[in-house]
Amino acid sequence: MDEETKTASSRALQRHDGVALWRQIAQALRGAITAGRYPPGGRLPTEAALAQDFAVNRHTVRRALEDLSRAGLVRVEQGRGAFVAEDVLDYTVASRTRFSEWIRRHNKEPSGQVLRLVEVAAEAVVAGALGLRAGARVVMLERLGLADGRPVSLANHYFPARLRGLREALEASPTITAALSAVGVTDYRRQVTRVTARIPTAEEAALLAMPRNRPLLITENVNVDGAGAVVEFGIARYPTPRVQIVFEP
Amino acid sequence: MDEETKTASSRALQRHDGVALWRQIAQALRGAITAGRYPPGGRLPTEAALAQDFAVNRHTVRRALEDLSRAGLVRVEQGRGAFVAEDVLDYTVASRTRFSEWIRRHNKEPSGQVLRLVEVAAEAVVAGALGLRAGARVVMLERLGLADGRPVSLANHYFPARLRGLREALEASPTITAALSAVGVTDYRRQVTRVTARIPTAEEAALLAMPRNRPLLITENVNVDGAGAVVEFGIARYPTPRVQIVFEP
DNA sequence: ATGCATTTGTTCGTATGTATG
DNA sequence: GCATACATACGAACAAATGCA
């Protein structure tokens, strides 16, 4: 490598001054990360590149990366590289969880994008959750949720057809809460949440701006109104490890 | 295929009798599945094989499989085949969740296998959860949980070293609850649970008897004693889709 | 990393039986 | 009887995903 292309941090290394080289490297990388030189989720240079950059052996770089990894600042993945840890969005499951509230609690700006709003025949799982017979008509809303413009959730919401005018309300309203309110459901709460995970389809990965080899977290939940009647069944998909689910009893 | 190797069900097909062939095929497969001829999680013959077996076109078999898939009886995966849906173990997160209770609630026989029981230095995540400084000594127990002999969980339990005699108690005792009781912690409850997912390592996949391309569900949880002091931090890994996590507020 | 075999997914075209008017 | 619409069934080819060597 050309001497002139070295970073400022690489020049600062002091040998035999009582501070191990790997500590100095770790500190330099820490500084570069917090300074934003390597953005969250971004990839650090390869170990070989860093070794050449700092003019040390690759083992020394690995020691530094191990330190950062233990501290949770970076995530090292075999065959892929080292990545700056992303800020995780904790999705706290509570009785009355609304998307916008969740995002705002993390000091980010919520926004959404309706992908589909159609009336379909309920499949077995959906019908079972809504307490309908298979094939019954339901309104389905597919929506991409974003935080500061970055996709963080992809949700399918199913509503029983007995809620007259809901589809029109959803077309007019930006939020589900408002649309339900427009058809007389002024309050609803989450009854049960089921969590699983799977590999995303190509389409899901593209929409959520995530690699295809990382799993989706999937929640299925049933919302009921004040009288206990089911008003919504939702299946939401979240990209790992950007989103985690948290349960506080 | 030799005429003699056809299954009984394939001979039962009646053409032009008012019941569509694909319905008859779906019904025959339904019967074979419920009769245990294709066990849960097992693979059905390929579409081509079934088509030859039933002496119909592959489209007709696909139609039948689509019906079973919609009903939730089978799961079809491109490039792999069609699989009989497995009975899912719902892991209900509650304040006082014990492994053996969970398994017994599903009418299965719980058992366990200790993989490691060692004293180690706490890494950042573990130390943070236990309220210790990084590097503090902790007791770590790694345990494989089985239901009717089938692996369903792989858990790492971390205990603060202040619990004197715990390691010996864990060596002697079959369950964590009993060991904690032996060192004076007669009651503990789950404080917070965090859920995420990732692809398993080769070792994890082997231990949990699962394919490497299917994600693990991972829970991290903190257990506190009656006084609110942290007595355990646990990281458990569950195979999807055999296990799902359920929150009931 | 690459190619290959296997398996499901999709899309053509064609033909036939059935219900309707 | 005839025209039409619809569901059913078959055949061929190719696309896409998976697993393996």
Image (tube, coloured by chain):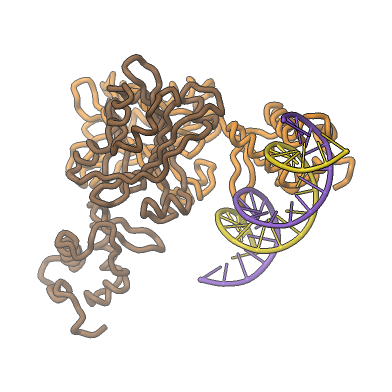
Chain colours: A brown, B orange, C purple, D yellow
Q: Residue furthest left?
A: A17
Query: Looking at the image, which is closer to me, B29 or A99?
Result: A99
Query: Looking at the image, which is closer to me, B176 or B46?
Result: B46
For the point 71% across and 33% down, which residue is it?
Answer: B26
Identify the image quadrant of the N terminus of chain A: bottom left
Decide if residue B222 is on the left or right side of residue B62.
left
For the point 60% across and 43% down, which residue is it?
Answer: B76
Q: Is residue B52 visible?
A: yes
Image height of A1 relative to B53, above or below: below
Decide if residue A17 is on the left or right side of residue B202.
left
Residue A28 lies, in percent from the top left, at: 16, 66
The answer to which quarter of the image holds residue B34 is top right
Residue A158 lies, in percent from the top left, at: 43, 32
The answer to which quarter of the image holds residue A47 is bottom left
Residue A176 lies, in percent from the top left, at: 32, 33
Residue C15 lies, in percent from the top left, at: 83, 49
For the point 89% across and 42% down, which residue is it?
Answer: B3
Q: Is residue A14 visible?
A: no
Give the tally of numbered discs.
0
Image height of B127 relative to A221, above or below: below
Image height of A19 relative to B134, above or below: below
The answer to which quarter of the image holds residue A75 is bottom left
For the point 37% across and 58% down, which residue is it?
Answer: A77
Query: Looking at the image, which is closer to me, B226 or A245?
Result: A245
Q: Residue furthest top?
A: A227
Identify the image quadrant of the C terminus of chain A: top left
Decide if residue A39 is on the left or right side of residue D20.
left
